[in-house]
């Protein structure tokens, strides 16, 4: 059964999930906040069970990934399972970057099938012996989740491969996505079994688990959660083709910190958040953050490194040294190149071989002297694409060897079977040059491993008769589409699609003199040896701790259904404004002042028709009829349109153009701001705005009597934002000596006179009411935009000043759950109308009662 705590999350994707059996039940744990964790059936442990639970005193971090860092082997004779750590796993190596007092727990799947009858025993054994919690996915679910959605849809998409026709790539399959959702939910169940402290951190790894943060955030609103993506993140033009694009983005944004290998990957993610979710991001003191529901989601850009100690220990093994000597003897007198890649369509093996073919064709002197050893790792996925890539590579190897080889010499040596890791690094040691030619790759640590291998060790130097302290050399050719490329400034960076350029790079790498080889190697080794896997893990964990430091200083609550769930995290004093609360206060008071913004408050920003509805007019009329009320529309719009729209509300006050013009009611004249500004500034500002309008499709200029506004609501989101920032700087520069201010708002840039703001006009209106003997004891102010924050600040400070004979009740309310100077919020314009209708009905009822008494 599906636990009650995540039923709503799965509502929209429930079809087809019930066929997947649940993972085996293991020991439940407890956490100190917010309460007990239920077991898989939803039951709560009793008091006796609680007495047996031990508290955790030291810091813990839960590492969650698709696979556990374990080797698993079942003895066919005895039937017993044997487990051991996978020393080459990054998940295991990252422990070196954490404090020695930090307890690390791993959650993930085993790479082998375990019979259902053995799962409970194995799970307990792994927990006791390795601090590992296995997620036993049913075979059908595993196939659809990992081999289906992950490998056939997400992985190709993230590597820029689209199913542009029916026979090229896999079209989106909803059932595979349902399996992805279900698998992520099972991973969440396992995390919830072991998380048991306010201080526990969770670090999720890679694209297999991008929905996991949503599941965990729903269970624990204040969970301390980081995510690192080890694959590329594609540009928005590619990513937007994913039918469930928003669900995945929101899943990642439910983390506190999201990590990427390169700035390119992070930039693509930020662009997707901006274009598809309308989110803004900015950099503060070197840290990039996205504002999401009152939470700031951090963005971390740092490539992972290699474990230097692990590589050095392998290099010092007698088996490794013996293999190096064997390779050097076998290829004595030849220039050895090495490549090590997975066999898939993105690693560029065929392009690499074509470049080698061109090199040998152009340079006859290299024939017989140059050998490329191409190591092919075992395939991690299957399908026609993999078979085609393998067939193409084998064909090219055969062609090159037939054309340029001879008896006893082949220019290409293809190792297409699994070899031990120590043999692979032996080839790195012996090779003068390493080439990584992938057309798209997440990080690729082969160049780092090659650099460390070429540095060698003392033990290896002694056995190979290398003079102690002698110069080390290396040469690297790296595709510019590989994640490690920006870090290796001494490498030959190539476009793998241009085989001629790759051939030229091969020639220059071979032809380099020793001093240049040494300088390039030293530069690379300094970087690789300082930016190792421990440095990466330590840096990420420190930033995660910083991102979570204010979790318990803010109020959190969940909003949204299904995979749109998110947590709003705001100030403890910030709460939703209820109709009952306002009406109760409204009925107790004798004088009320109500200030209402228009666009985004009474009228939705997305509405094409901007005229007020009959419902809005009716509510405002009812409020204005009550003699105890003073109601004002405070808007940035011009006075002509506002006067026309609200002509039937005779008692309604209007403050137009942020208060530059004021009218107390329909029968009174407009009052202009006492601020006198020479309109000559418009002659300077308008041509600048026109320039940006002409170059920004979808933008427009609104000319007001007191101000100029540049709108870019209908422009491309990223380009419009970029142009707005440039326009803001441009206008501030040219208007520096003019008595105006330049401000940015919700998809606008506005120039208006100094001394004019919604905050100042609200203060002026309140002073006038008090001076006329109409001091209000009920103040309400509702708005949604940045300019309305001035109103909130003004009404709060004015109400607490000595201006009022008695402190009034204040209801400063923003529309939307977001950081604000207001103390209350409502969700949208519909709730604003509901709120106003509630107090309007109260006024009607009171008026009827008065008439009956008369």
Image (cartoon, grey):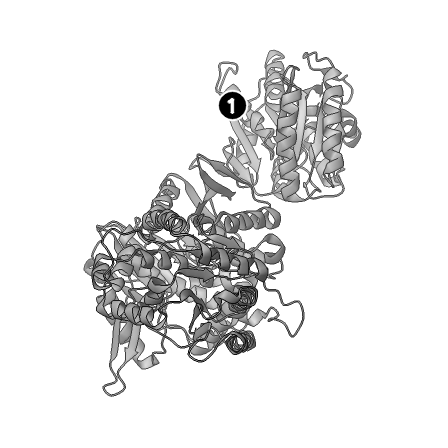
Instruction: Residue 251: give x, y in percent of width and height.
Output: 49, 55
The secondary structure type at the circle numbered 1 is loop
Among all residues in the image, which is located at the extreme front? 365
Return the residue nearer the eye: 462 or 703.
Answer: 462
Return the residue nearer the eye: 466 or 88.
Answer: 466
Instruction: Residue 165: give x, y in percent of width and height.
Output: 67, 70
Disc 1: CA contacts within 10 A as few (<14), some (14-19) or many (>=20): some
Quadrant position of residue 749: top right
Q: Quadrant of the C terminus?
A: top right
Up the image or down, 137 lies above or below 542; here it is: below
Q: Which residue is mark 1?
A: 808
Quadrant position of residue 125: bottom left
Instruction: Residue 799: give x, y in percent of width and height.
Output: 51, 21
Quadrant position of residue 811: top right
Up the image or down, 486 lies above or below 339; here it is: above
Up the image or down, 685 lies above or below 285; here it is: above
Q: Quadrant of the N terminus?
A: bottom left
């Amino acid at each position: 059964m599906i636990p009650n705590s995540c039923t709503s999350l799965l509502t929209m994707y429930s079809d087809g999930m019930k066929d997947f059996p649940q993972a085996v039940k293991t020991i439940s744990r407890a956490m100190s906040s917010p309460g007990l964790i239920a077991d898989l059936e939803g039951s709560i442990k009793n008091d006796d069970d609680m007495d047996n639970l031990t508290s955790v005193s030291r810091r813990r971090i839960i590492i969650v990934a698709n696979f556990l860092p374990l080797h698993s082997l079942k003895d066919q004779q005895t039937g017993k399972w044997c487990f051991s750590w996978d020393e080459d796993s990054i998940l295991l190596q990252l422990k070196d970057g954490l404090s020695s007092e930090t307890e690390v727990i791993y959650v993930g799947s085993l790479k082998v099938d375990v019979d259902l009858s053995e799962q409970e025993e194995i799970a307990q054994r792994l927990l006791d012996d390795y601090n590992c919690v296995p997620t036993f996915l049913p075979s059908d679910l595993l196939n659809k989740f990992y081999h289906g959605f992950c490998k056939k849809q997400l992985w190709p998409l993230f590597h820029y491969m689209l199913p542009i026709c029916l026979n090229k790539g896999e079209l989106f399959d909803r059932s595979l996505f349902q399996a992805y959702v279900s698998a992520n939910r099972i991973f969440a169940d396992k995390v919830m079994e072991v998380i048991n402290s306010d201080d526990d951190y969770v670090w999720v790894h890679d694209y297999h688990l991008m929905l996991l943060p949503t599941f965990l955030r729903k269970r624990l609103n204040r969970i301390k959660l980081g995510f690192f993506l080890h694959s590329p993140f594609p540009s928005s033009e590619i990513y937007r083709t994913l039918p469930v694009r928003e669900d995945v983005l929101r899943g990642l944004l439910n983390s506190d910190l999201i990590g990427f290998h390169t700035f390119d990957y992070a930039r693509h993610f930020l662009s997707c958040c901006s274009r598809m979710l309308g989110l803004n991001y900015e950099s503060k003191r070197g840290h990039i953050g996205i504002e999401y529901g009152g939470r700031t989601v951090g963005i971390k850009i740092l490539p992972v490194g290699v474990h230097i100690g692990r590589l050095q220990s392998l290099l010092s093994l007698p088996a490794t040294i013996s293999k190096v000597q064997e390779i050097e003897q076998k290829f004595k007198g030849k220039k050895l190149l090495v490549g090590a890649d997975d066999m898939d369509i993105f690693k560029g093996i065929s392009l690499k071989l074509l470049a080698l073919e061109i090199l040998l064709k152009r340079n006859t002197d290299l024939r017989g002297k140059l050998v490329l050893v191409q190591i092919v790792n075992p395939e991690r996925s299957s399908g026609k694409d993999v078979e085609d890539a393998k067939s193409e590579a084998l064909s090219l190897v055969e062609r090159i060897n037939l054309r340029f080889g001879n008896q006893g010499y082949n220019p290409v040596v293809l190792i297409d079977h699994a070899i031990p890791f120590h043999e692979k690094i032996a080839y790195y040691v012996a090779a003068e040059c390493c080439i990584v030619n992938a057309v798209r790759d997440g990080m690729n640590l082969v160049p780092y491993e090659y650099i460390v291998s070429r540095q060698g060790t003392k033990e290896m130097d002694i056995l190979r008769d290398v003079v102690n302290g002698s110069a080390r050399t290396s040469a690297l050719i790296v595709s510019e589409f590989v994640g490690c490329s920006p870090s290796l400034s001494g490498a030959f960076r190539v476009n793998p699609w241009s085989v001629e350029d790759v051939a030229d790079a091969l020639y220059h790498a071979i032809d380099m003199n020793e001093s240049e080889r040494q300088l390039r190697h030293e530069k690379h080794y300094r970087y690789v040896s300082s930016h190792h896997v421990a440095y990466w893990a330590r840096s990420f964990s420190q930033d995660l701790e910083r991102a979570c430091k204010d979790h318990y200083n803010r109020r959190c609550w969940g909003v949204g259904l299904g995979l749109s769930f998110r947590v709003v995290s705001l100030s403890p004093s910030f709460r939703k404004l209820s109709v009952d609360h306002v009406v109760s206060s409204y009925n107790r008071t004798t004088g009320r002042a109500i200030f209402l913004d228009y666009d985004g408050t009474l009228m939705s920003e997305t509405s094409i028709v901007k005229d007020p509805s009959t419902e809005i007019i009716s509510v405002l009329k009812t409020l204005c009829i009550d003699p105890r009320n003073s109601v004002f529309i405070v808007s940035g719009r011009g006075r002509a349109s506002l006067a026309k729209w609200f002509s039937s509300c005779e008692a309604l006050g209007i403050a137009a153009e942020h208060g530059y013009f004021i009218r107390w009611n329909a029968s009174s004249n407009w009052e202009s701001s006492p601020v006198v500004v020479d309109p000559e500034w418009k002659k300077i500002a308008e041509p600048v705005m026109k320039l940006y309008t002409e170059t920004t499709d979808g933008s427009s200029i609104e000319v007001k009597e007191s101000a100029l506004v540049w709108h870019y609501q209908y422009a491309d989101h990223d380009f419009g934002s970029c142009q707005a920032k440039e326009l803001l700087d441009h206008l501030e520069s040219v208007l520096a000596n003019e008595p105006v201010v330049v401000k940015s708002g919700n998809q606008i840039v506005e120039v208006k006179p100094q001394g004019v703001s919604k905050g100042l006009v609200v203060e002026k209106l309140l002073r006038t009411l008090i001076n006329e003997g109409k001091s209000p004891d009920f103040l309400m102010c509702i708005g949604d935009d940045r300019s309305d924050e001035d109103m909130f600040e003004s009404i709060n400070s004015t109400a607490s000043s000595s201006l009022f004979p008695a402190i009034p009740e204040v209801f400063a309310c923003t529309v939307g759950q977001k950081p604000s100077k207001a103390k209350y919020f409502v969700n949208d314009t519909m709730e604003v109308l509901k709120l106003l209708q509630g107090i309007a009905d109260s006024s009607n009822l009171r008026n009827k009662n008065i008439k009956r008494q008369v």
